[in-house]
Image: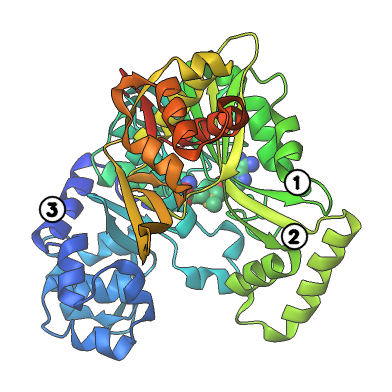
Amino acid sequence: MFFSSFQNPDDFKRLRDVFEAARYTDAAILEALGVKDFPSIRGADVPLLLRRTNRGTPLDTFIRLFLIEVPCDLAAAEQAFRPMRLEKLIESGLIHVDGMLVKAAVKLLPFKGLLLAFDSPRMLQSDLRQNYVMGIGRSTLTLANLTVRKQAGMALDLGTGCGIQAFLAARHSSHVLAVDKNPRAVHMTTFNARLNGLSNIECLEGDLFGPVWGRMLDLVITNPPFVISPEMKYIYRDSGMAADQVCQKIVRQVPQFLNEGGYCHILCNWTEHAGHDWRERLQTWFKGTGCDVWVIRSETRDAAAYAFTWIQHTEKAEPEQFAQRFEKWMAYYDQQGITAMGAGLITMRRLAKDKNWYRADDAPEKMLGACGDYLVQGFELRDFLETIQDDSLLLDTRFQISPDVLLERRAKPTPEGWVDETVQLRLERGLAYSGNIDPFMANMIIKCDGQRQLKDLLFEMANALGVELAKITPTFCHVARGLIERGFLLPRDFTC
Ligand SMILES: C[S@@+](CC[C@H](N)C(=O)[O-])C[C@H]1O[C@@H](n2cnc3c(N)ncnc32)[C@H](O)[C@@H]1O
């Protein structure tokens, strides 16, 4: 079993101290390698990285072993891990020795103040690939950035992998349940929790909600094996269920575990079918869940591009099988009438009321930094809009402009003076929506100072345009609702 030789909590502390003494942190690694971020390392040449880690310091040794994944000599490893003995680390499954060389058996990387062990992608090419435990992927970061970080009692990370989402949730939750069907992932999460000195994590092995039956939760975070394919080859990727059933199953089951007001985030891939609106199909999933729902779509890919990308991820080493596998995936899609896959984040909030709302739209072009607070703001603004469905109520309301708004004008000189060609509105933080806006609407927004009712601004606009009030009111209200929903305009006393 992974790390079975680490019986004593002091073993974990000693290992942590070894990495701390070596300054094995995100910032120190980037500085040593002379790169600005971790994705840039991927593209860098190994010879260049080796040159930059040739001083023989413990930091260099750890970067070579656990990041670049090249062997180092026995003496360098002994020196880097001192005072720990290499035997202990070999027994734990962290490293192994091959003659006079030491190799890493897992990746071990710092991330946001944590130190995390997970499997090397090289394992995907080995016989052990089925139980591969993924590390910090693009989907991991997306989910982490979008998670609501409100103080929670009990949280659940469903499909925890190396435990990353659970550990981030542990910073704002009293207790976190970290569940995975893969026993190797449960061992790794347990190891990582102890290595990071986290005592509020409970690691559980099992299928979906099976291990948490009867527990009530304030937050559920899940990056499930959502890939849509006919395969069951890797537990981190394939659920073994048809099409997008795994995400549907989570949606249907989660409400019974959520406390009132509790949030659930599901990173999701769903099927799309020619001639059918994806929003309508997804809406049927949430019927009777007792949850308000916001689906943020990040992209839709046609089925062939989707299959190609996913097969390429893992099958690079087997080019002759690529075409065969690709045909199998495409036949599966054709059989089910699947023409494209949508991807995005589903957020559900349990709230008992007569009629829950459903919102589904595209993600902004940019999501800047941690967006959890902006998600909560989105839920609250939508709640507010539900209270002013009648246009007369909307028009009676006073709005202020969000402090995160940036307005950019491109104007041209004409004989009548400068005329706006385009006006662009942008949010500069969080869910950074942007888009062009009608110059008259832009003028209206500028005047939203929290003092004047929207109907006064509508009146001024109708005068400026020389049109009847009734003619522009429906469009005006529609655009205003969109601006409120996306957080450009906030009700006067709004605090989030
Ligand atoms: C895409 S990985 C996500 C890992 C990690 N949470 C992250 O965000 O990077 C999906 C995880 O779900 C686990 N898993 C797969 N099927 C499961 C099931 N039926 N029940 C619980 N976990 C499952 C896999 O073992 C894997 O660790």
Q: Secondary structure at mark 2?
A: loop
Q: CA distance from mark 1 to mark 3?
A: 43 Å
In this view, 400 is above or below 247: above
Where residue 176 sits, quadrant-wise, is top left
* Number of the front mark, 2 or 3: 2
Identity of the amino acid at label 3? Asp
Say whether residue 152 is visible: yes
Residue 367 coordinates in the image, percent (x, y): 40, 50
Quadrant showing the C terminus: top left
Q: Residue at x 87, y 65 (%)?
A: 331
* Left or right side of 46 for 435: right
The local secondary structure at tag 1 comes to: loop
**395 w.r.t. 54: above or below:** above
> Horizontal and vertical percent for residue 186?
47, 44
Nearer to the camera, 190 or 447? 447
Q: CA distance from mark 2 to mark 3?
A: 43 Å
Classify mark 2: residues with Cα within 10 Å, few (<14), some (14-19) or many (20+).
some
Q: Nearer the viewer, mark 1 or mark 3?
A: 1
Q: Residue 89, image x and y in percent?
A: 28, 61
Q: Amino acid at mark 1?
A: Met
Task: Write down the quadrant of residue 15 in the picture.
Answer: bottom left
Which color scheme is applied?
rainbow
Q: Which of the pair 370/262 is nearer the observer?
A: 370
Q: Earlier in the sequence, mark 2 or mark 3?
A: 3
Q: Which mark is residue 241?
A: 1
Q: Is mark 2 within 8 Å of ligand 1?
A: no
Tell me the tag on residue 231: 2
The amino acid beneath tag 2 is Glu
Please tell me the numbered disc located at residue 17. 3
The residue positioned 33% from the left and 80% from the top of the image is: 70
Q: Is mark 3 within 8 Å of ligand 1?
A: no
